[in-house]
Image: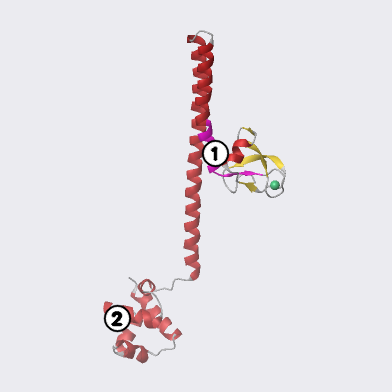
């Protein structure tokens, strides 16, 4: 703890409150010399005096012990930093979900192709082969829907016409034609249907 800094703060705040050393001493039931001692950095107020001193000077205990006022500026800086951290976390989470989606799709497509190959090789042509291919197709749809759900849950799509971001509902995305992750969507801003590119983060592809 920096006694000098604390002392300077006490003096500055006392003067800001237009209090003399004598007046402050009176309110704290200490001698004028004690106040002078604190302000010169030759000692700290007793712990039991701290709450009262803070109250009189209208500063927080933390500010008193740090020897400086928390300016609104650094406070809003902290909040800014907090928001940035949260945005970063969300971005990381989105990246992870995005990666998962691609892995799910890759694994399903490989399984589908592998399954089709096995059926064509090991099952003799006929009704059973057809049934198995159909079942495989239906099973393949499950990870597709799941992947679409993941895809819709992160980021947005950018309207080609006006550049605004579109966050479609699951049904809208399901019904929209797509090429890769570019979807044919109707923009609620300009009401035009365009091939909207997927954007993961706010600043992407601007
Ligand atoms: Zn638009």
Residue at disc 1, CB closer than 8 Å to ligand 1: no
Left of 100 or right of it: where is 160? right
Q: Quadrant of residue 174?
A: top right
Check if residue 147 falls in the magenta segment: yes
Q: Nearer the viewer, residue 82 or 193?
A: 193
Cβ at disc 2 under 8 Å from ligand 1? no
Q: Examine the rendered structure and indicate whether residue 197 appears above or below residue 66.
A: above
Q: Position of residue 144 (x, y in %)?
A: 53, 31
> Mainly helix, strand or loop, the magenta region?
helix
Q: Position of residue 117 (x, y in %)?
A: 51, 14
Going from N to C along the chain, the mark reached first, 2 or 1, is: 2
> Which quarter of the image is occupied by the N terminus?
bottom left
Residue 49 falls in image quadrant: bottom left
Residue 161 is left or right of residue 14, and the answer is right
Given residues 140 and 45, the one toward you in this image is 140
Residue 190: image tag: none
* Residue denoted by label 2: 49
Q: Position of residue 115 (x, y in %)?
A: 49, 18
Q: Secondary structure at mark 2?
A: helix
The residue pinned by badge 1 equals 151
Q: Position of residue 161 (x, y in %)?
A: 72, 45
**Residue drawn at the location 33% of the way across and 85% of the way down:** 35
Circle 2 residues within 10 Å: few <14, some 14–19, many ≥20: few
Q: Residues within 10 Å of mark 1 (few under 14, many from 20)?
A: many
Asked if residue 21 shows in the view, the reply is yes
Look at the image and give the residue range highlighted in magenta: 144-158
What residue is at 61 percent from the left and 40 percent from the top? 172
Q: Nearer the viewer, mark 2 or mark 1?
A: 1
Name above or below for residue 61 compared with residue 119. Answer: below
Q: Is residue 46 visible?
A: no
Q: Say if the magenta span includes residue 156.
A: yes
Residue at mark 2 to residue at mark 1: CA–CA distance: 60 Å
């Amino acid at each position: 703890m920096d006694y000098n800094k604390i002392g300077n703060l006490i003096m500055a705040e006392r003067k800001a409150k237009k209090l003399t050393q004598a007046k402050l001493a009176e309110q704290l039931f200490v001698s004028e010399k004690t106040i002078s001692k604190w302000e010169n950095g030759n000692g700290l107020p007793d712990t039991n005096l701290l709450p009262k001193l803070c109250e009189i000077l209208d500063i927080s205990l933390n500010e008193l012990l740090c020897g400086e006022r928390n300016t609104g500026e650094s406070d809003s800086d902290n909040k800014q930093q907090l928001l940035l951290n949260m945005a970063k976390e969300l971005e990381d989470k989105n990246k992870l979900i995005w990666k998962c989606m691609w892995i799910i799709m890759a694994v399903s497509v490989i399984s589908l192709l592998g399954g089709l190959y096995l059926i064509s090789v090991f099952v003799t042509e006929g009704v059973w082969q057809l049934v198995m291919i159909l079942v495989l197709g239906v099973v393949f749809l499950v990870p597709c829907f799941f992947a679409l759900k993941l895809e819709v849950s992160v980021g947005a799509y950018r309207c080609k016409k006006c550049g605004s971001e579109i966050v479609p509902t699951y049904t809208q995305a399901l019904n929209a034609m797509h090429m890769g992750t570019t979807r044919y969507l109707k923009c609620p801003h300009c009401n035009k249907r365009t091939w909207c590119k997927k954007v993961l983060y706010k600043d992407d592809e601007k």
